[in-house]
Amino acid sequence: MKIKRIEYLNKARNECFLTLTNNETEIVCFSDMEEHFLGEEIGIDTPLQLLSVRNILIPDSFQEEIEKFGDHSYKIIGHLINKEEGLVISKSFFFHIDPHIIPGDFKASDAIYFEAERIDLF
């Protein structure tokens, strides 16, 4: 994934919203850890952090989907890669969910639906 757009909130503190793309899907995430550049590649070894995740359930459809609703909120259907670490993949984006909030009946490779208030890049 690479950075397509940067919208600074406070440039001195590197607070910004980044539009990330993988040529199929775009997502907007918050970052304040370091300076970023247009076209910068973000490695898949850096999962995106999900804040205020709710409504975790088994989806009706198993097709991966990322849908924005509200200012920075997303509805995501993905696949659980590692339940113990809370890793999910959807549309080639890797996400991290607090593993303690994933219901006990989910297992690796299961389709998973959830909503997140915001996505962060640390």
Image: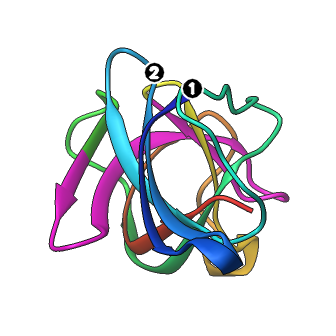
Q: Quick check: is 18 in the magenta stretch?
A: no
Considering depth in this image, is 107 or 73 the residue closer to the camera? 73
Question: Which structural element holds mark 1?
Answer: loop
Residue 22, numbered circle? 2
Residue at 67% of width from left, 77% of height from top?
Answer: 12
At label 1, which amino acid type do we have? Answer: Met
Quadrant in which the N terminus appears: top right
Gap in Å between the C-alphas at discs 1 and 2? Answer: 5 Å
Judged from the image, the secondary structure of the residue bearing numbered disc 2 is loop
Question: Does residue 103 appear anywhere in the picture?
Answer: no
Q: Position of residue 55 (x, y in %)?
A: 34, 76
- Circles 1 and 2: CB atoms closer than 8 Å: yes
Q: Pick whichever, 49 or 10, lies toward us.
A: 10
- Taking the image as shown, residue 117 lies to the left or right of residue 52, namely left
Residue identifier under label 1: 1
Per the rendered image, the range of residues in magenta is: 67-90
Mark 1 Cα-neighbour bin, 10 Å: few <14, some 14–19, many ≥20? many
Quadrant of residue 100 within the rendered picture? bottom right
Say what amino acid the circle numbered 2 marks: Asn
User: Principal SS element in the magenta part?
Assistant: strand
